[in-house]
C-alpha cells in the first residue's frame, strides 16, 4: 500500500510552520515562515505554504490540509482569532482554502492540534484520555476524552490556562483574575522573579531563571517553587475531574530537565485525590515545536481519511 500524505499548517502569532506528513507520522519536510501582514495577507500566505508543501509529493496522494489556528474555531470557521492576529472574526477559512487549493480542509484550535500530535505521534501514544498543557508566554492546552478531542459545546471550552487558582488574584491576559496562566506561565515566572531580584540583567528569560535555580540562587529557588506549586494546583484539579492516563506538559520550560516534571509530579500527588490519580502519569511532551504541525496532519487522517 502506497503512503498517503497530509499537509499541516500551524499558524502562530509570529510564525507559521508547515510541511508534509505521511500516514505513518513521518515528517517528510517542514518549513517556518514569519507571519506577514493583515488577514488577507495571512490567508494568501497559508495558500502559498500549502502549494509549496504540495510540490513535495504526488498531488493525488494528498488526503487534505490540516490547519491549527489560535482562537475559537467551529466547523472550519474562525469565530475569533488571537489578539495579535488582525481580523479573523467569523471567517470561513476552511471554505476559502478549499476553494483556493482544491484540497479538503480541517481546522481546529492550535493548542488542540499540539495535544492531538502528542496523542497520535508523541508522548501519549496508546492513550485514550489525556490532558495536554503547553507552558510558555501563556498556558494553552487540550483535552482528549475517550480518544476524541473535547472542546466543550461549540468548541468554546478547554481553556485550561484560565481555571481560577487564586480568588481575586493577579490580572490575567484574558481579563479575569487569578487564572493559572497568571501564576504559572513563563511570563508570570519572569515577573515574579523580577520582583524578588534586586539586580537584574537587561533582559531575563525562563532559561536564565532555571539555571539560577539549579545553582540554588535564593530568588530563583523561590520563584521556581512558586511556579511548581501553582502548576501542581492546576494539574491536580484536572486530575480530580478527568482522571487522565497521562498529563503531558510541553513548552520550552518543560525541557529544563527531569527535575521539572518530577517536582510537579511530587506536588500533584500530594494534592490530587488518590483514586483519581491512581492511573495517571505526568510526562514531558515529546514532539517539541513540531507537535502542532504533526497534530494538524493527524487531524486530516482521523477526520478526513479515517486512518485512525
Image (tube, grey):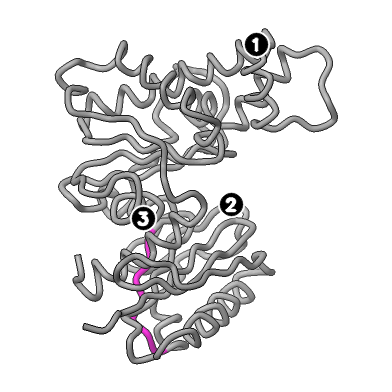
Quarter holding residue 272:
top left
Marks 1 and 2 sit apart, C-alpha to C-alpha, by 37 Å
Would you call the spot at circle 2 few (<14 residues within 10 Å), some (14-19), or many (20 or more)?
few
The answer to whether marks 3 and 2 mark residues whose Cβ atoms lie closer than 8 Å is no
239 on left or right of 199? left
Task: Give the residue number, with chain letter if any, for mark 1.
Answer: 216
Question: What residue is shown at x 48% (from left), y 19% (from top)?
Answer: 228
> Residue 137: x percent and y percent?
59, 39
Q: Earlier in the sequence, mark 1 or mark 3?
A: 3
Question: What residue is shown at x 60% (from left), y 56% (from top)?
Answer: 13
87 on left or right of 259? right
Q: Earlier in the sequence, mark 3 or mark 2?
A: 2
Marks 1 and 3 sit apart, C-alpha to C-alpha, by 35 Å
Task: Give the residue number, with chain letter if any, for mark 2.
Answer: 83
Residue sitting farthest toward the front: 1
Would you call the spot at circle 1 few (<14 residues within 10 Å), some (14-19), or many (20 or more)?
few
From what the image shows, is residue 234 above or below residue 69?
above
Foreground pick, 254 / 12: 254
Mark in the foreground, 1 or 3: 1
Question: What residue is shown at x 33% (from left), y 30% (from top)?
Answer: 282
Magenta stretch holds residue 106: yes
Q: Secondary structure at mark 3?
A: helix
Task: Give the residue number, with chain letter if any, for mark 3.
Answer: 117
> Residue 203: x percent and y percent?
79, 32
Quarter holding residue 121:
bottom left
Mark in the foreground, 3 or 2: 3
> Residue 182: x percent and y percent?
54, 28
Amino acid at each position: 500500500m502506497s503512503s498517503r500524505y497530509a499537509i499541516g499548517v500551524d499558524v502562530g502569532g509570529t510564525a507559521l510552520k508547515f510541511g508534509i506528513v505521511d500516514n505513518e507520522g513521518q515528517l517528510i519536510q517542514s518549513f517556518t515562515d514569519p507571519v506577514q501582514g493583515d488577514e488577507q495577507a495571512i490567508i494568501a500566505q497559508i495558500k502559498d505554504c500549502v502549494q509549496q508543501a504540495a510540490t513535495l509529493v504526488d498531488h493525488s496522494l494528498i488526503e487534505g490540509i490540516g490547519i491549527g489556528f489560535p482562537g475559537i474555531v467551529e466547523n472550519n470557521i474562525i469565530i475569533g482569532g488571537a489578539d495579535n492576529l488582525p481580523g479573523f472574526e467569523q471567517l470561513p477559512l476552511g471554505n476559502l482554502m478549499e476553494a483556493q487549493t482544491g484540497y479538503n480542509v480541517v481546522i481546529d484550535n492550535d493548542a488542540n492540534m499540539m495535544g492531538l500530535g502528542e496523542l497520535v505521534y508523541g508522548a501519549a501514544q496508546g492513550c485514550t484520555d489525556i490532558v495536554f498543557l503547553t507552558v510558555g508566554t501563556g498556558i494553552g492546552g487540550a483535552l482528549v476524552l475517550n480518544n476524541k478531542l473535547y472542546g466543550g459545546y461549540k468548541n468554546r471550552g478547554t481553556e485550561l490556562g484560565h481555571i481560577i487558582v487564586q480568588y481575586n488574584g493577579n490580572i490575567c491576559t484574558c481579563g479575569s483574575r487569578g487564572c493559572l496562566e497568571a501564576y504559572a506561565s513563563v511570563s508570570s515566572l519572569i515577573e515574579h522573579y523580577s520582583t524578588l531580584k534586586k539586580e537584574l540583567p537587561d533582559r531575563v528569560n525562563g532559561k536564565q531563571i532555571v539555571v539560577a535555580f539549579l545553582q540554588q540562587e535564593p530568588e530563583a529557588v523561590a520563584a521556581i517553587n512558586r511556579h511548581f506549586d501553582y502548576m501542581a494546583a492546576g494539574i491536580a484539579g484536572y486530575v480530580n475531574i478527568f482522571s487522565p492516563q497521562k498529563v503531558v506538559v510541553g513548552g520550552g520550560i518543560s525541557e529544563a530537565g527531569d527535575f521539572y516534571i518530577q517536582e510537579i509530579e511530587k506536588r500533584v500527588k500530594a494534592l490530587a485525590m488518590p483514586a483519581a490519580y491512581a492511573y495517571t502519569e505526568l510526562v514531558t511532551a515529546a514532539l517539541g515545536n513540531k507537535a502542532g504541525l504533526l497534530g494538524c496532519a493527524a487531524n486530516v487522517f482521523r477526520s478526513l481519511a479515517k486512518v485512525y
